[in-house]
Structure formats: C-alpha cells, structure tokens
Amino acid sequence: MTRQPVVELMDPMMVEIMRNKTPAQRLAIAFRMWDSARLIVKGGVKYQHPDWSDKEVEQEVAIRMRGSVSANGLCGQRVCSSHDTKRTNDQVSMGYRWP
C-alpha cells in the first residue's frame, strides 16, 4: 500500500514573515529544520535498533533521509546483512519503499 504525499499550506501570516527574511535567513531556517528532522529520524532508528553500531545508525539515517530509499548503504555497500529482515510491513506502510 502506497501512501499519497500530503501537501500542507503555510499560514498566511507565516508566508508574510518568511517573505520578509533574506535568502540567507531562509536558508538558515531550512538547515535548522533539516537538522531537526535528522535528529528525529536518528532517534527513531536508535529506538528500533538499539543493538546497531553508530555507523549502522548513521548509514540508516542517511538512507531514510535521502528520499529514494533502497536497502543499500552509502557507496552502494550493504551496511548490515540483516537490513532486509529488519524492515517490517509497518515501515512499508509508512511510505518507505524497500526493494
């Protein structure tokens, strides 16, 4: 089952606030949002796989954050031989597409 993306509209007041920011300020906000999302994903991976090393956790975070998800780690190398068995139907239904 594939979930459809949801588009959320910004509040008109937030639109006005963002329009008054410089490009550098908007970029800084986007970077902070990215860092926050990465920390949330990292916490979820650590919770789901407390036995994984820091390297395995970081590589799984990178896989989940890059958008086009595959079972291969960075540089095309498989991070952990048990990756395929650790992916659950719940993860698939959450929108992740595993090979």
Image (spheres, rainbow, N blue to C red):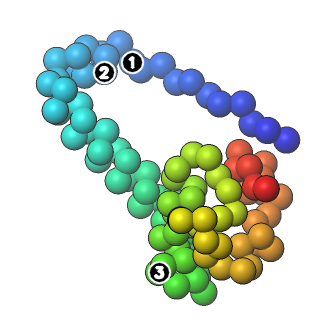
Tag 2 residue = 14
| Mark 1 residue element | loop
The dot on residue 19 is none
Tag 3 residue = 54
| Mark 3 residue element | helix
Q: Residues within 10 Å of mark 3 (few under 14, many from 20)?
A: few
Q: Please name the residue shown 74% across and 79% down the image.
A: 82
Mark 1 or 3, nearer chain start:
1
Percent x, y of residue 17: 22, 20
Q: Amino acid at mark 2?
A: Met
40 relative to 33 in the view: left or right: right
Percent x, y of residue 49: 62, 77
Residue 16: name its quadrant: top left
Q: Please name the residue shown 17% across and 33% down the image.
A: 25
Q: Amino acid at mark 1?
A: Asp
| Mark 2 residue element | helix
Residue 43 visible in the shown view: no
Residue 56: name its quadrant: bottom right
The span from disc 2 to disc 3 (Cα, nearest Å) is: 37 Å
Q: Is residue 98 above or below residue 19?
A: below
